Image (cartoon, grey):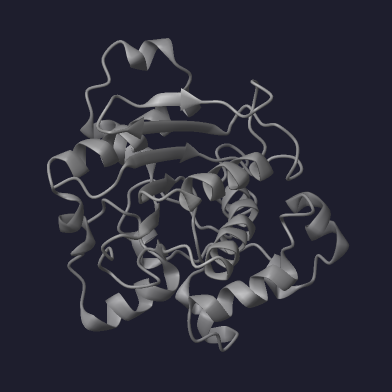
Amino acid sequence: AVRFFKHIGIDYSGAGSPKSPQTGIRVFESASGNWPTEQKPASGYNWSRQDVALYLLSELSASSPVIIGIDHGFSYPDSFFTQNNLKNWDEFLSKFALHWPTCQQSIKDIRLQDSVDPWHQASDDLRLTERWTAGASSVRQFAIMNGNVAYSSHAGIGWLIYLRNQCRGNNIPLHFWPFDGWDFPAGSSVVVEMFPSIIKRRLDCGEIATQWKSHQLAAYAMARWLSTTDNNDFLDKYCSVILTASDKAVAQKEGWIYGLL
């Protein structure tokens, strides 16, 4: 049986300010098993990160559960947790919000204000899921400029905190995978981290690949793969990541790229 009413794929960007529209942010949505279609903000042009958060909150507030795949990291490497005595993802989020108020300011401005803050330092440390993934870079490596996951991750985590707080405050069931557990709860919406370059290789996108720009294709591929996988009753299979108990405990703090077994 299909688990989710909608399957949403978001290709993210950490450029500019939280309220500034970005060509690199693309949103595709598949409803009731149909092919994904591109969604636009109320302005009809490009999404800002604030626009995306408000759109997602509206989708999460609906009665039917949705699954959302987002192209950025949700957490830091375990080495940072150890160095700063952080026990779990919620502790990480509460500290992150203090050091990275990315719902109000750009990443560039935050780093300029206090470049010696350990939370603002670049690092090559990889999460376990990144070590399992060819071509992945650290969520803390700011020096890489093209397609930088560090910028999109730091810009996006603040909005994950916003959605988490809003849903908890309004009793909206929302599961951040795998931080809240490795299984998708019945009746709950789910947010997962995804890596479009993996997903695109699994799909035959045909003419669409030549019609759309890379950001559009990335968001489309995530939404389509989630929808197809759900329609084949296979989503739960990708929750069963084969890890040792100790690695699974690490991944529950660091996060995991959904679809990577």
In the picture, the quarter occupied by the C terminus is bottom left
Name the quadrant containing residue 174. Answer: bottom left
Q: Quadrant of residue 192?
A: bottom left
**Residue 215 image point, x, y percent:** 49, 28
Relative to 123, residue 6 above or below: above
* Residue under the image location 42 percent in, 64 percent down: 173
Q: Is residue 196 left or right of residue 4?
A: right
Q: Is residue 194 visible?
A: no
| Residue 194 at x, y percent in the picture | 38, 48
Direction right: furthest residue: 113
- Tell whether 226 sits left or right of 232: right
The total of numbered circles placed on residues is: 0
Which residue is rendered at x = 53% and y = 69% of the image? 168
Residue, x 26% and y 14% (percent of image)?
A: 206
Can residue 197 be seen here? The reply is yes
155 and 48: which one is in front?
48
Residue at figure coordinates x 51%, y 85% from the top left = 82
Give residue 72's position: percent from left, percent from top: 50, 50
Q: Position of residue 54 (x, y in %)?
A: 62, 45
Compared to residue 261, the image places residue 168 above or below, namely below
Residue extending farthest to the front is 63
Compared across the picture, whether 41 is left or right of 28 comes to: right
Please name whichever residue, 167 or 136, is drawn nearer the observer in this view of the structure: 167
